[in-house]
Amino acid sequence: MKSILKLLFGSLVLGVGITSCEKDENKIYYEGATAPVLTASTTADMVLNKDNKDDEAVKFTWTNPDYRFTTGVSSQDVTYTLQFDTAGANFTSPNIQERAIAKELGVTLTVKDVNSFLSKMELSAGTAYNMDIRVKASLINSALPLYSNVIKIRITPYLDFAVEPPGTAGNNYSDGTLWVVGDAFAGGWNNPLLAPYDVSQKFTRIDVLHYELTVPFNATGGYKLVQTMGVWGTQYHALDGTAALSGDFEKRDADPQFPSPGAGSYKIEVNFQTGKYKLTKL
């Protein structure tokens, strides 16, 4: 009986071993790939001009990384991401700009496209910046991403914004003014604001795209941003009426209001370059 049991156990172990080998042989393993090689139609200095915003600025092309597995070259679609960052930041800037490009081995950017990258990075108009550009290649659920070589281009952006700032376009918006109006503040919904709120609820213009105001809030209520006293038609309102401390806004005579964050003194920062606002309790 013992001999029979030993024989059966040995057969079982052998069977498991054979099955395991068969399973290992059926596994697909990643064997490697080649980092994409990035080229540009031009690397000359660019001074971007809004009058030419729809013209081609630069065309980027890159090679296929040819992801390889034990079954051969992958037939899956590769996703590419074009990355823009300031030189020396090593693509770690909080404002790094990216554009996903599925399958294609190239992309053509207009003057407006390139300028939009720099504007969203909050880089100043009229100033030249050394930019680093590369492509990241990745395969869904397989292997680590691969990065191309870095192309360097010196680019000077023009004034651009996500939301049109206060002021006159012909004067480059340098004459802009901004107030808060609403029952979230002592001045209420009076428009124009009565004294002294016409002064205490007026923003300081940091530059044409950035405004700041420190003001005491009521515990409840809402507010709008008004660029001309007595005029509602050119107001700014929040896109999310529940986002008290930060969010997006637009220029339109519409709801929802910006909501009060609660009683206390706050600094309001309004960024027309990105179309975002932020409140900080003091």
Image: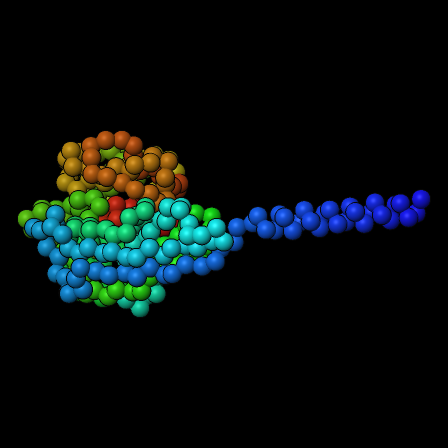
**Which residue sits at x=43%, y=47%?**
140
Task: State the quadrant of the N terminus.
Answer: top right
Residues 174 and 140: in front is 140
Residue 155, quarter of picture? bottom left
Residue 200 screen position, x and y as percent:
24, 47
Residues 181 and 24: in front is 24
Can residue 96 be seen in the rendering of this structure?
A: no
- Horizontally, residue 161 falls left or right of residue 68, namely left
**Which residue sits at x=9%, y=47%?**
169
Residues 247 and 67: in front is 67
Can residue 239 be seen in the rendering of this structure?
A: yes
Residue 147 screen position, x and y as percent:
36, 60
Residue furthest bottom in the image: 88
**Which residue sits at x=28%, y=60%?**
38
**Which residue sits at x=62%, y=47%?**
23
Q: Is residue 240 above or below residue 56?
A: above
The number of discs equals: 0
Residue furthest right in the image: 1
- Horizontally, residue 165 falls left or right of residue 142, namely left
Residue 259 screen position, x and y as percent:
34, 37
Q: Is residue 147 above or below residue 164?
A: below
State the scheme by which the image is colored.
rainbow
- Horizontally, residue 183 falls left or right of residue 160, namely right
Residues 133 and 158: in front is 133
Residue 161 screen position, x and y as percent:
19, 48
